[in-house]
Image (cartoon, rainbow, N blue to C red):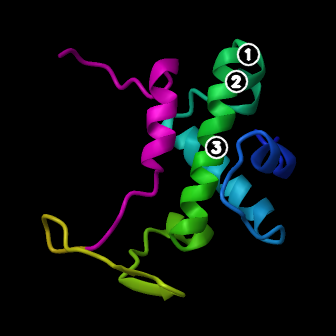
């Protein structure tokens, strides 16, 4: 089960343009990553039992993850191969070194994480 389809991504979410040929793979990978981000509390079965407001936030998070994957090297970003640098037209990206000197970036879209916060699906326990 896919949480979103290309029509939802384009016509409701208004995501950045994604090549139609790439969309199915990006959508599948994005759904898997969002399931992982929710500690697998989100599954196709649990999704159907969720309130519509939570389902809508999940759809938006999956779309944000699709955008993030597409902007950061496609579905291969999930293979944890950090992007060293890239240039496309006027846009140029150069990876910066992290604490341990690596350039690895998160596989998860920061926007998708923010979208999911109010659902409680990303809660990992503990107190402030």
- Residue, disc 2: 55
- Residue, disc 3: 62
Q: Which of 12 and 84 is in front in this view?
A: 12
- As measured in the structure, the alpha-carbon distance from the residue carrying label 2 to the one carrying label 3 is 11 Å
- Mark 3 crowd level (few <14, some 14–19, many ≥20, 10 Å Cα): many
- As measured in the structure, the alpha-carbon distance from the residue carrying label 3 to the one carrying label 1 is 15 Å
Residue that appears at 40% across and 23% down: 123
Residue 127 in the magenta stretch? The answer is yes
Residue that appears at 44% across and 26% down: 117
From which residue to which does the magenta span run?
103-128
| Mark 1 and mark 2 residues within 8 Å of each other at the beta carbon | yes
Above or below, 113 relative to 72: above
Q: In which quarter of the image is residue 73?
A: bottom right
Above or below, 44 relative to 69: above
| Mark 3 and mark 1 residues within 8 Å of each other at the beta carbon | no
Judged from the image, the secondary structure of the residue bearing numbered disc 3 is helix
Which residue ends up furthest to the right in the rendered image? 7
Q: Is the magenta stretch mostly helix, strand or loop?
A: loop
Above or below, 66 relative to 36: below
First in sequence: mark 3 or mark 1? 1
- Residue, disc 1: 52
Q: Where is residue 19 in the image (x, y as percent from the top left)?
A: 77, 70
Q: The N terminus appears in which quarter of the rendering?
A: top right
Q: The C terminus appears in which quarter of the rendering?
A: top left
Judged from the image, the secondary structure of the residue bearing numbered disc 2 is helix
Judged from the image, the secondary structure of the residue bearing numbered disc 1 is helix
Residue 113 in the magenta stretch? The answer is yes
Residue that appears at 47% across and 19% down: 118
Judge from the rendering whether residue 7 lies leftward or rightward of residue 119; answer left or right: right
């Amino acid at each position: 089960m896919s949480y979103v389809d290309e029509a939802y991504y384009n016509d409701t979410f208004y995501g950045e343009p994604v090549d139609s040929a790439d969309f199915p793979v990006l959508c599948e990978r994005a759904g898997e990553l969002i399931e992982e981000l929710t500690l697998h509390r989100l599954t196709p079965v649990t999704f159907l039992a969720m309130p519509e407001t939570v389902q809508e936030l999940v759809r938006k998070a999956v779309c944000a993850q699709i955008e993030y994957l597409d902007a950061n090297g496609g579905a291969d970003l999930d293979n944890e191969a950090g992007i060293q640098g890239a240039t496309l037209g006027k846009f140029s990206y150069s990876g910066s070194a992290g604490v341990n000197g690596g350039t690895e970036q998160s596989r998860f879209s920061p926007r998708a994480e923010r979208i999911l916060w109010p659902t409680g699906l990303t809660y990992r326990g503990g107190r402030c």
